Amino acid sequence: MTRAGSHGNGRPSRRARPAGGLGNLSGADTPQRSARVRRKIPVSHDSEPQPVTAHPGGPLNGALKPPGDKSISHRAMILGLLAIGETRVEGLLEGDDVLRTAAAAKALGAQITREGEGRWRIIGVGIGGMQDPADVLDFGNAGTGSRLMMGVVGGQPVTATFDGDASLRKRPMRRILDPILKMGAQVVSEAEGGRVPLTLKGPREAIPIRYELPVASAQIKSAVLLAGLNAPGTTTVIEKAASRDHTERMLRLFGAEVSVTPSGEGGHGRTVTLTGQPTLRGTDVIVPADPSSAAFPLVAALIVPGSEVTLRGVMMNPLRTGLITTLVEMGADIERLDEREEGGETVADLRVRASRLKGVDVPAERAPSMIDEYPILAVAAAFADGTTRMNGLHELRVKESDRLAAVAAGLAANGVTYAIEGDDLIVTGNGGAPTGGGTVATHLDHRIAMAFLVMGLAAGQPVTVDDGAMIATSFPSFRPTMLALGARIEDGAAA
Ligand code: S3P
């Protein structure tokens, strides 16, 4: 079997991770070196796929704090790099994706030290103070890290080469290059179709632009705003549907002037304006628990009969809670307890009890607030009574994998009735457990792996995922966390 990330000879290519934990990216950036990097197809984990199987079992019980939010963790590293002075981060997600961004920030000139679990200190270089990295910036599986950093490099006088694993090499980067080229960046070289590996050269000073996003994407919005930090004048981004606003919030926290006004049809959109060339000052960042990671134990608690699980300190930013809204509409018993402010975000403890779910229609407008949660929602829908229609999922085709296809294949492998109509996914459950017993291809996608392991905890038969290694990109403690709740998840394929 040839798997994604292999050389086509069946042998996956060698491990590519930030050396020394934070990336020893030293070495001359010679054309020979770049060419060498271009030929190899890195994957983000050890060479052999690591199948993992989840077994159906008794109720899940207990309390846990999900890992730090991935989006905020990337941004803390990036703004820490761009600020003057010291930034201290607490609760950083120490997953592979964020460590790649940290390695890149270090290669661009930041001093970064880990002071304890989730506690990091960054001494930034200030806007305009970055250095050319000595080697390729290898972002592994990290779409957010690479795209946001393209915005940073695209607005400042540095030249850097971006690369990543087999999954990242397939993902569209033109959506980032289009606006930053307008802002004065140049593409020195690129792989076919504007993909990584690609080399970007930023301008001495960026050109401020007014940019209407072609798709609802916080990554594109953020890249333009980050490039706009080095532009004289105002950079404006217009989005038809509001996407996660962590960049705007954190820019303000570091001292930038950012205005956000509702716009567009029904006020669903946003116009975001940044005043360029601010002085960003290092500050303290507290990272709340990631609702996108919380989603996995949350849905597990809903579908494993008799379960009761409490998830502590989960971020409740309304631009991230579309899954919870949807599950509550489906009849989920989710109580929000002790809502409070932490690090500029509302967080809450979520008490989740096993529930009978019913099918619902999920409107396309909700997609930006739950874009990473459709694989696990599809699993919940497989246990619901009736049909769940998830509308407007075109962006799922360009995530870490083609998630629409990967979810469909996983549902099919486990006896779930589904259909794809255009960009909509329709899952029909009968109110009971699906047969399970399937093996799911994860295509280097952490969320596909976790979603189908959750299915295996309550299906008729165990569910195997072909490779659990990528889970470390966003939720390194997923397995011990689930085991502590009483789940049975084991190495290897089902016997
Ligand atoms: C992210 C934005 C989303 C999301 C990704 C994280 C971010 O991507 O899927 O996991 O941190 O900005 P898009 O902006 O491409 O929708």
Image (cartoon, rainbow, N blue to C red):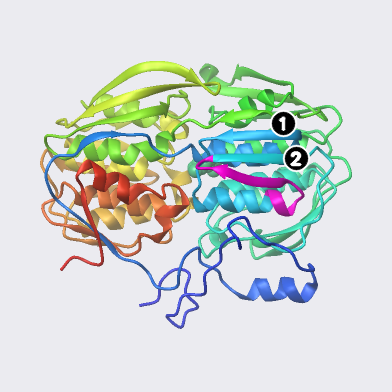
Q: Is residue 85 left or right of residue 212?
A: right
Q: Is residue 328 above or below residue 219?
A: above
Q: Position of residue 441 (x, y in %)?
A: 33, 62
Residue annotated with mark 2:
124
Q: Is residue 340 magenta?
A: no
Determine whether, in the image, residue 415 is placed left or right of residue 369. left
Report the span colored magenta.
105-118
For the point 68% across and 28% down, which residue is it?
283
- Outermost residue on the front side: it is 115
Residue 324: percent from left, percent from top: 33, 28
Q: Nearer the viewer, residue 150 or 481?
A: 481
Residue 213 shows in this picture? no
Of pointers 2 and 1, the one earlier in the residue sequence: 2
- How crowded is the residue under tag 2: few (<14 C-alpha within 10 Å), some, or many (20+)? many
Q: Which residue is mark 1?
A: 282
Q: Residues within 10 Å of mark 1 (few under 14, many from 20)?
A: many
Q: Position of residue 115 (x, y in %)?
A: 58, 42
